[in-house]
Image: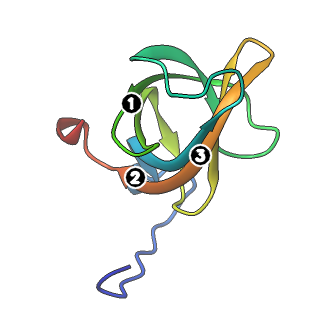
Amino acid sequence: MGKNILYVVQGENHPSLYSYGLIATDVNWISQKEMPSVFSCTAKFRYRQPDQSVTVYPLKNNTCKVVFDKPQRAITPGQSVVFYDDTVCLGGGTIDEIIKERNAL
């Protein structure tokens, strides 16, 4: 966005549509006042999406890095990520940045 460039690709499974993780900001926890240490859970990035396995790494200032077990398609800054333990909602935040390359994790 900083360079005002829009990339267009063909096909819904094009590799450019996938990412390996994200940075979430304004993270709120429902059952705790602060973010727990590194943990695994499931997450959703879109309404009615099946749960996706992730590992959450706390950062400073209500921010976390979320690493996907499998690359995810069409993760979009500005949308929400919501964390779950089975059917229990743990909390969530705003997707601020996507991690497009595995070596950037």
Q: Which residue is mark 2?
A: 98
Nearer the viewer's eye, disc 3 or disc 2? 3
**Looking at the image, is 56 positioned above or below residue 59?**
above
Q: How is the image coloured?
A: rainbow
Q: Mark 1, residues whose alpha carbon is within 10 Å: few (<14), some, or many (≥20)?
A: many
The three-letter code of the residue at mark 3 reads Gly
Rounded to the nearest angstrom, the CA distance separating label 1 from label 2 is 16 Å
The three-letter code of the residue at mark 2 reads Ile
Please report whichever mark, 3 or 2, sits nearer to the chain's N-terminal start: 3
Residue 59 seen in render? yes
Q: Which residue is mark 3?
A: 93
Q: Position of residue 43 (x, y in %)?
A: 62, 29
| Mark 2, secondary structure of its residue | strand
The three-letter code of the residue at mark 1 reads Pro
Q: Which residue is mark 1?
A: 58
Verify CB contact (< 8 Å) between mark 3 and mark 2: no
Please report whichever mark, 1 or 3, sits nearer to the chain's N-terminal start: 1
Q: How many marks?
A: 3
| Viewer-nearest residue: 58 or 95 | 58
